[in-house]
Amino acid sequence: MISKKSILKDKDTGHLTSNDLAMQIRLLKWRDLRFTKKLKNENRNYFFYKEKLTWKTHLKWYYKYMKTSDNFFFIIEFGKDKYGTIGIRFRDGYWDIYSVSRNKSVTYQKDLMFNAMLKITSFFDQSHIFRCLVLINNPALFWYKKIGFVVNREFCNYSELHFQQSQT
């Protein structure tokens, strides 16, 4: 099983390499909590947890996250901007993708989140399916389908999507 330490090629940065020199993908750090709280609160209508995050709740999540070995939360940066987030954790035999959010206050970069998703998923064991649960009211549902996720099952208020990287 992959660990956070194995991602931290350089203990200080935790960057995944990218062909796009302007794009950086790195693990969440303490200094990112203000950004992740803001992003989560701005997009809470599209997530399962709808309550406005307080610092207490966010810190509780962060400390629990830091103790886990099968949960990875990435910050995607473009240039000097924090562009978005992608979380991935191993749950129930799947790589569960969660908290995919784009910072709408920075200039849109075509395919940046798609390329970040490809890079992140390529780093993990491909013998397990990548799964994402998406609320049906989430406008990103179309984006997930566009980039290669397929609906596996539908429930009353969300869809379970699966993604398999092409093995080229």
Image: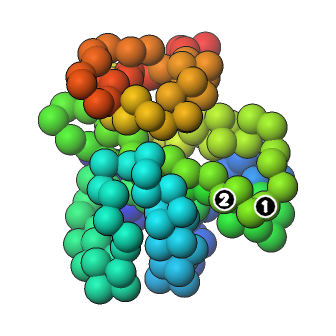
What residue sits 37% from the left and 35% below the top? 135
Nearest the viewer among 14 and 96 is: 96
Is the residue marked by circle 2 packed among few (<14), some (14-19), or many (20+) residues within 10 Å? many
Can residue 74 be seen at all in this image of the molecule?
no
Which residue carries the number 1 mark? Answer: 106
**Mark 2: secondary structure:** loop
Is the residue marked by circle 1 packed among few (<14), some (14-19), or many (20+) residues within 10 Å? few
What residue sits 38% from the left and 15% below the top? 151
Reply above or below: 156 against 19. Answer: above
Q: Which residue, as the protein is rendered here, is positioned at the far left?
A: 92
Can residue 73 be seen at all in this image of the molecule?
yes
What residue sits 28% from the left and 78% below the top? 57
The three-letter amino acid code for the residue at tag 2 is Asn
Residue 28 at what x, y percent from top left?
49, 69
Q: Is residue 73 left or right of residue 34?
A: left
What kind of colouring is applied to the model shown? Answer: rainbow
What residue sits 69% from the left and 66% below the top? 82
Residue 92 image-quadrant placement:
top left
Residue 35 at what x, y percent from top left?
57, 74
Q: Is residue 100 left or right of residue 54?
A: right
Nearest the viewer among 134 and 110 is: 134
Q: Is residue 162 left or right of residue 36?
A: left
Residue 152 at what x, y percent from top left?
32, 14
Reply above or below: 124 against 127. Answer: below
The three-letter amino acid code for the residue at tag 1 is Val
Q: Dots 1 and 2: beta carbons under 8 Å?
A: yes
Residue 24 at what x, y percent from top left?
70, 58
Nearest the viewer among 83 and 71 is: 83
Which residue carries the number 2 mark? Answer: 103
**Mark 1: secondary structure:** loop
Disc 1 to disc 2, C-alpha distance: 6 Å
